Amino acid sequence: MTFMTWSDNYLTGIEAIDRQHKTLVAMINDAAPELAASPALDIEVALPLLDGLLDYVAGHFQTEERIMASSGIDSRHLQHHQAMHGEFHRQVLALRRRVESGDDIDGTEVLRFLSNWLAFHILGEDQRMARELEAIGAGIAANEAYERTEGSKAEILQGANDVLVNALVNLFSQMTEQNRALAEKNAVLQAAHRELDNYRRTLEQQVEIRTAELRQAKEAAEAASHAKSRFLGTVSHELLTPLNAILGFAHLLEQAEIPPKAKEQANRIGAAGKRLQALLGDVLQFSRLEAGEVNIDYAPFQAATLLARLRERLAKSAYQKGLTLTCDCAPALPALLGDQHLLGLALEALANNAVKFTESGAVQLRARLLDRNNNRLLLGFEVEDTGGGIAPERQHQLFGAFEQLDATTSRRFEGIGLGLAIASRLAKLLGGELTLDSTSGGGSVFRINLWLAAIDEQAVPAGSDAGLDWDATSTVLNQLKMELSQGNIVARKRFGDLRPFLSTLDAAAAQTMAQQIDNYAFDDALLTLNRITAALGPTPPADGPAAP
């Protein structure tokens, strides 16, 4: 909003003077918003404004005095004009000194001073001067022209008052119009807010509905998946029963004294049955994994023994294809605590694939020690082949269920695409991860990295992979922990039963625990027991030993 609007009411009829007046009005209008909004005037705003006023007034008064002198105006008017100039200059300097000294000057005080001086200087003094100069120009003597304008002061002041009233009315009109416009904008803004609130509520309702639908769909999909897994498991199991009978009779026929052609047919029946048995076994194993029905059975085992037995099972199929099948196990590996059956199934699935898809060369089974943390070992179980390899852009689809790189009906290799999916899920169940390193034409390395607990080999029965009875052991461990927490003296006998086993995990800690129990420091003994069994994971073990 403009503070002071220029109009014809401000004109004096002297072009140079009116031009300077317009400059002054513009200067004040530029400063007005800052002045009106400043309870304490900022020195960086005030000083440039006051200095500009001093420069303006010096030039303006010089222009007026030059015009008055050239027109021969009465000396009394000239003296009055010079006095006014001096007074205004003094007031501006006084304001400037107050600003420089740090006085709190309200911006509206400066604005009132400027508007008052502007109105009465332009509308009063300068228009009076213009009338006097006009009279002199009309041939009236300077002293008479002065007397006439002195006599018309009241008229001039009334004119100034009328102009100020008009300015006030215009200002009020502008404020009213602005308030009306603000009210309209506020109404539009409130309507927009209401609309946004409606949109927000509608969106929240839609999100809630969609979330509920997705939740229901997820639950339905999970239920369908479980139902599918149960169905596959049931069907596979039911099919295996008569299939085993067929295989049994086929074997009897193979051993019987029958014609060569009949024996050949019996062999074919047996081979086809075994192939079907393997496929149904994969489906049954996968359905059990999906349904969460596979439990981990921890027992001591040797990595070298695990690989050797796997090599024995694959030796015939590798020999038939002319492949070299080797084992390479890291030396001096201790006995390990884990589920060798599930780990063996995962490695066998990888090795079967390696033999199947390798036309020439070798398949190597490896166990490597990658890291160690006290009695925790990070082992890498690897199956490497010299087959055709797999392009990186196709590797992502390998570990999905029923996924095959060649899914056409005319594909060269048999199978339903469950081997790698089973291996991947078994690795995850054991707390590890199945990874692949392969390039097209460069062979493949499938790797399962797994943290396992090392145990004292003396605790493992010689020549046997039979492990600890973990159901019984975990029950006794929990009883011992409860008795120690209660300060029950029965803990002494319970510890005696468990000490050989605990010594296989940490002999020094078991000795410390024995001393603590002898001294009846059951709380300390409980802490020691927790440290010993931490390497085993949860008790009873549920998810396999956790990585440190």
Image (spheres, rainbow, N blue to C red):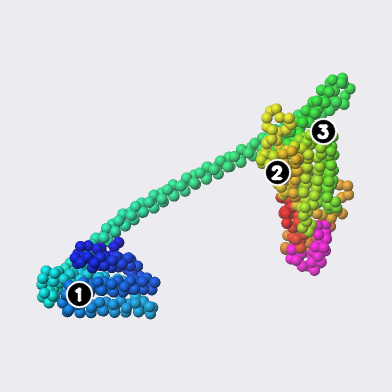
Frontmost residue, 412 versus 457:
412
Identify the amino acid type marked 1: Ala
Give the image location of residue 226, x and y in percent: 64, 39
Frontmost residue, 187 versus 136:
136
Upstream in sequence: badge 2 or badge 1: 1
Q: CA distance from mark 2 to mark 1?
A: 108 Å
Which SS does the magenta portion mostly show? helix
Helix, strand or loop for disc 1: helix
Q: Considering only vertical position in the picture, is 464 above or below 160?
A: above
Frontmost residue, 498 versus 40:
40
Pointer 3 residue:
321
Camera sees residue 446: yes
Helix, strand or loop for disc 2: helix
Q: Quadrant of the N terminus?
A: bottom left
48 sits to left or right of 230: left
Counting other residues with Cα less than 10 Å from the Cα at mark 2, is it few (<14), some (14-19), or many (20 or more)? Answer: many
Q: CA distance from mark 1 to mark 3?
A: 126 Å
Q: What segment is highlighted magenta in the picture?
A: 503-527
For residue 69, which numbered disc appears in the image?
1
Q: Quadrant of the C terminus?
A: bottom right
